[in-house]
Amino acid sequence: MFRTTLIAAALAIFASATGVQASEAELWKALRGGGHVVLMRHAIAPGTGDPANFQIGDCATQRNLDDTGRAQARATGAALRDNGVTEVEVRASQWCRTTETAELLGLGPVIADPHLNSFFSNRDRAPEQTAAVRATIATVAPGSPTRVLVTHQVNITALTGVYPRSGEIVVVRPTPEGGEAIGRLGPFGR
């Protein structure tokens, strides 16, 4: 009993500290209504980081989605559509695994956004990129199309304090300071 209470208290503190507290129904309603942001970690791409010979324009030098990741991305797009989240703007980092995830969502054209690029191997870029994404989130107006940003774990953690799983969504309510995480969805299709 004490252990269960302690775990529940720890989860409540975590939810409070990260702003992650809305129910799944509330999250879907918020996304359908627009004026919110989906921060999505790319779907499953086995491994960690990128090879030493990594080049943005060459997918053969990168860690990429596998068949499970592709199915996960499609399932996430289906979950968004099935829950009425269809008026969206989709942006992705320039990494192949994020671009492919965004395309497989099937929600519309994908805009490449270098501010969403991973800074896993170069943490010096974190403050500038995080500030740029916060500024972008702050411009999302109430009722405007939901903005879907497909990026990387380090970027999402820097923005929200949440450590998302592959393919997981963190729902963000824009604020003048750049946004507040209000909940998590997924991952789907696993």
Image (tube, grey):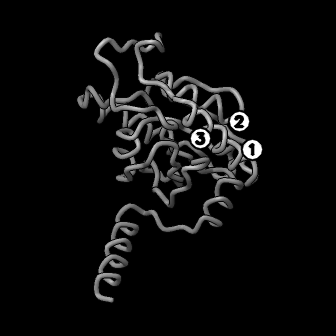
Residue at x-position 66% and y-position 43% = 75
Task: Report how far apart the C-alphas of labels 2 and 1 lie in the structure.
Answer: 7 Å
* Residue that carries the numbered disc 1 in the rendered image: 86
Q: Residues within 10 Å of mark 3 (few under 14, many from 20)?
A: many
- Which dot marks residue 72? 3
As drawn, which residue projects farthest toward the left? 124
Name the quadrant of the N terminus. bottom left
Q: Is residue 118 left or right of residue 45?
A: left
Image coordinates of residue 21 in percent, x first then y, are 48, 68
Amino acid type indicated by mark 1: Thr
Front residue of 170/101: it is: 101
14 w.r.t. 185: above or below: below
Residue at image mark 2: 107
- First in sequence: mark 2 or mark 1? 1
User: Horizontal and vertical percent for residue 188?
Assistant: 59, 49
* Residue pictured at 59% horizontal, 50% vertical: 36
